[in-house]
Amino acid sequence: HPNPFNPDVTISFALAERANLNITIFNVKGQRVKTLAEGKYEAGNYNIVWQGNNDNNQSVGSGVYFYRITAGKETLTGKMLMVK
């Protein structure tokens, strides 16, 4: 939230138990844009902010982006719209 966003968006999620977590942003071509989180996370509620930049810290353009949250064997994908 918010969606659409400019310049940053918060991705909220909860883990029921400790898990290996990966949150990755992709563009509409399926190319990885940014890895937001990676590693072991304890159970709890989390808010991760994406500031509309790539792994090289360069600002990305307007458009549709997808986030993928993988925690253990569970995967969740969502769509976001960046408007500049």
Image (tube, rainbow, N blue to C red):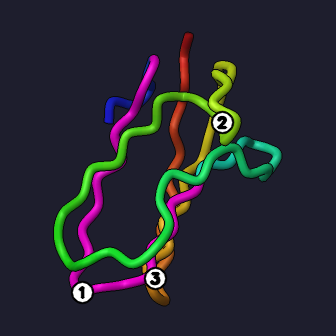
Q: Give the residue type at disc 1.
A: Glu
Within-10-Å neighbours for mark 2: few <14, some 14–19, many 20+: some
Q: Give the residue type at disc 3.
A: Glu
Q: Give the residue type at disc 2.
A: Asn
Placement of 41 over or under 37, stated as above or below: below
Within-10-Å neighbours for mark 1: few <14, some 14–19, many 20+: few
Front residue of this view, candidates 30 and 37: 37
Disc number placed over residue 38 in the picture, else none: none
Between the C-alphas of marks 2 and 1, the distance is 29 Å
Residue underneath mark 2: 54
Q: Which residues are magenta?
A: 7-24
Chain-order first, disc 2 or disc 1: 1
- Residue found at x 73% / y 51%: 32
Left of 41 or right of it: where is 24?
Answer: right
Instruction: Choose top left, top right, bottom left or bottom right for residue 40.
Output: bottom left
Residue underneath mark 3: 74
- Residue found at x 58% / y 56%: 24
